[in-house]
Image (cartoon, helix red, strand yellow):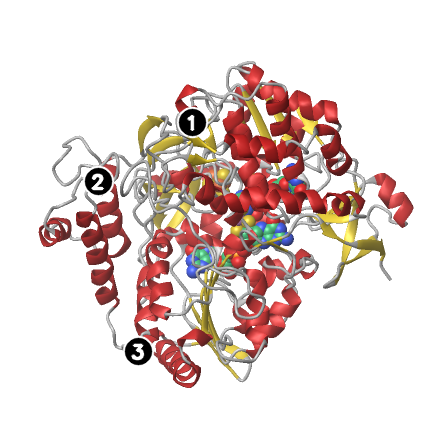
Amino acid sequence: MAPVCDDEVMAASETSRTAIRTCPLCEASCGLEITVRPDGAGGEEVQRIRGDRLDVFSKGYICPKGSTLKQLHEDPDRLRTPMVKRDGVHVPVGWDEAWGVVASGLGAVIDRTGRESLAAYVGNPTAHSLSAMMFSRVLLTGLGTRHRFSASTVDQMPRHVASGHVFGSPVAISVPDLDRTDHLVILGANPYASNGSVCTAPDFPGRIEAIQARGGKVVVVDPRLSRTAEQADQWVSIRPGTDALLLAAMANTLLAEGLADPGAQIADHLAGLDELAAALEPFTPEFAETVTGVDAATIRTMARELVAAPSAAVYGRIGTTTTEFGSTASWLIDVVNVLSGNLDRPGGAMFPTPVAGGGTTRGKPGSGRGFTVGRGHSRVSGHPEVMGEYPVGVLAEEIETPGDGQIRALVTVAGNPVLSTPNSERLADALDQLEFMVSIDMYLNETTRHADVILPPPSQLQRGHYDLLLLQFAVRNVANYSPPVLALDEGQPDEWEIIAKLTAIAQGVGVDVDPAVADDMAIAGLVRSAVKDEYSPVGGRDADELLAELNAAGRRGPERMLDFMLRTGPFGDGFGTDAEGTSLDDLIAHPHGRDFGPLVPRIPEVLRTPSGRIELAAEPLLADLDRLWSSAAELAERGLVLVGRRHLRSNNSWMHNVKVLVKGKPRCTLQVHPDDAGSLGLVDGGAARVTSRVGSVQAPVEVTESIRPGVVSLPHGWGHDLPGAQLRVAAEHAGVNSNTLSDDAAIDPLSGTSVLNGIPVTVGPAG
Ligand SMILES: Nc1nc2c(c(=O)[nH]1)N[C@H]1C(S)=C(S)[C@@H](COP(=O)(O)OP(=O)(O)OC[C@H]3O[C@@H](n4cnc5c(=O)[nH]c(N)nc54)[C@H](O)[C@@H]3O)O[C@H]1N2
Ligand SMILES: Nc1nc2c(c(=O)[nH]1)N[C@H]1C(S)=C(S)[C@@H](COP(=O)(O)OP(=O)(O)OC[C@H]3O[C@@H](n4cnc5c(=O)[nH]c(N)nc54)[C@H](O)[C@@H]3O)O[C@H]1N2
Ligand code: SF4
Ligand SMILES: [Mo]
């Protein structure tokens, strides 16, 4: 074997080339070194993918998913042509035919019931696609409906809401300064599996171990002894859904013991400290102990350590956001970082300075219009609009419930809500009641099987990339651009062209529209708003002149927009104001990325509150402490509850069709503590029936000491045995859909985010 292999490599190396590409599969944004060779049929194929050792940020790190971009590209189930549903079966069609069906399908619904009967759901990979990042807003505006939904309300929306109220911008989000901190407290995140989230840090595990190597301490708060908790110096086992109380008690300790000291720089820009202190007075560690299950002494020590360490940062993710008090918990993380003197200083919780497209690097620094929610309410349950969206938890009822504004047609972009959002059986049934559904997606899966038309984007390797969103939350100020690695297939439109054309069709322009028109309008809009911003480096300049200069580079679509954002960003060339500044040409000349250094303090310039202050006691959050107080008894008395978990070799719902990732022991198991297994009559390897208010599933039991008694855990994104999907590998490793159990009515009222952790369930042996 070996010599044969060597020969192949030798032969290939004469004609192979190396491409550098940022991995778009998770938030870590690792640099990849991809070897490409002729495929013998006039095209090219990927020979090997490994970590790019020269990448300024990831320095060669790669996880087992990174190299599967090759398998994803080559997956025979990945759609290469549009699919249209005929007599209940999806058949491949050409692009012209597909566009014709879209135009008549959407057109009929708009004619009959108007634009308010359209809806859109935008899924997670949108955040990892430059095309979709740049053009999904164009689509949402073009559809002209308020029925907008996204994966944000099963994810990080509480974080946006807390930042919006406290700092005035929903994207003014601090991240732990991982590479300099001496003390890290992680709540409800498992970066050893997830590689980090809303904290972009390739090799997050390595960065955690480096904290320990330099003598620092890592504490993990989690109802499971996760891989991250195992590595930590301390595991704090908590009752699910109660992090807000733990954090409130930590803040209470800092205040009660006279340890609260935000530091002179922050104190000058702080409002609401006294109100906050008064409101937190009842939240003593003793009170929190009864609900969280964490003893009062531990809570006090956790608080004192934040002050005693030379620097410290508190960081929370999914286990804190997707709970009943997600927004309040996110806010209290900020509160604890402020009170312990760790906000906005090296080693603490710091605000990145995004190189392109940052929401806090535009407009007047230091104050702004602030953050509002509730510009409209959902029709059936009256949930407030948040960041232009309604909770995805109400999507099904908005489809089912007759009346003005009932949703009759749905557009999904890069989303699989049938597996990812709560009460998914109800949602699946609702999708069948739609008059028309169109999905931009590369798979015929659990969600897109309901679509009348599926429009596939090119594979990840056939698209250019820049992590426009994720680099806003990076632990260093860095920028990488990757050109497409492989050419587009014959006749395949780019992803942005698909989104732009769908937009134009929805606007009634007809099927012959050229996506370039929407593109030209979008870039013109960007440039015009920048020249009106007196704080932009191009403020007051002539928009047409800038457009001409931009167009001289010969780019279109997302790349042209990115070039503009880079050049007008905080490190940009400003179209002539800074000769050393960056641009897309500059990033192309630096394929391994550019590093603009560690994070720097940004208070007060990052603030966008009307007062120009950090609103530590913002009214909606302060008011929610009452709800927290009055829910405590109920939370403390809850019986068995369900939480989720992630695995390094999985990625939400859509990578289970990659053989190398799903092989081995089944991973979709119900983890149960031995004590609970005993009392519930469950045995390891046996089957359990799990039932919640809304649904019931049967899952294999894994008895393990690594979970807190009273808590069971099932990962999400499984359940690939639904008829009509085309995922041949995933179907052999189907697992069960945990969101059959999550309750669509359980929603954090401040953010509209679903409760996916801490779901009351009953469990018993199956059958
Ligand atoms: N391999 C892999 N990587 C991924 C993903 C993936 O599916 N697979 N998904 C990506 C996405 S979209 C995201 S948003 C991120 C998420 O990134 P993380 O937030 O790091 O995600 P999880 O690994 O789910 O970690 C959540 C942890 O919260 C714990 N938990 C559950 N309930 C509670 C609670 O009430 N309190 C506390 N304190 N902890 C609780 C769970 O036991 C779990 O260990 O990961 C991203 N990266
Ligand atoms: N119970 C429970 N549920 C959860 C979570 C949890 O922790 N527990 N986590 C939640 C979180 S954090 C998230 S982010 C959501 C994710 O929820 P979704 O975004 O709805 O689901 P994904 O599994 O990410 O599905 C992505 C879809 O996009 C397609 N796709 C992949 N890449 C591309 C691309 O480049 N372009 C296009 N057009 N399509 C693409 C895939 O084929 C798939 O259909 O799930 C949430 N659901
Ligand atoms: S950690 Fe994330 S970005 Fe890095 S290789 Fe793995 S999937 Fe890709
Ligand atoms: Mo997510």
Q: Is residue 725 left or right of residue 461?
A: right
Task: Give the answer, above or below, for where 728 lies relative to 548.
Answer: below
Which residue in the protein does label 2 denote?
535
User: Which of pointers 2 and 1 lies earlier in the amino acid sequence?
Assistant: 1
Q: Look at the image and tell me in which quarter the C terminus lies.
A: bottom right
Q: Pointers 2 and 1 in contact (CB under 8 A)?
A: no
Ligand 2 within 8 Å of the CB at mark 3: no
Q: Is residue 284 left or right of residue 122?
A: right
Q: Which amino acid, by three-letter code, is at mark 3? A: Gly
Q: Can you give x and y, in whole percent of width and height, for residue 197 in the image?
A: 51, 40
Secondary structure of the residue carrying tag 2 is loop
Q: Quadrant of residue 74?
A: bottom left
Please state the quadrant of the image where ligand 1 appears. top right
Q: Can you give x and y, in whole percent of width and height, for residue 224 in the image?
A: 71, 37
Residue 598 at least partly seen = yes
Q: CA distance from mark 2 to mark 3?
A: 37 Å
Q: Which amino acid, by three-letter code, is at mark 2? A: Tyr
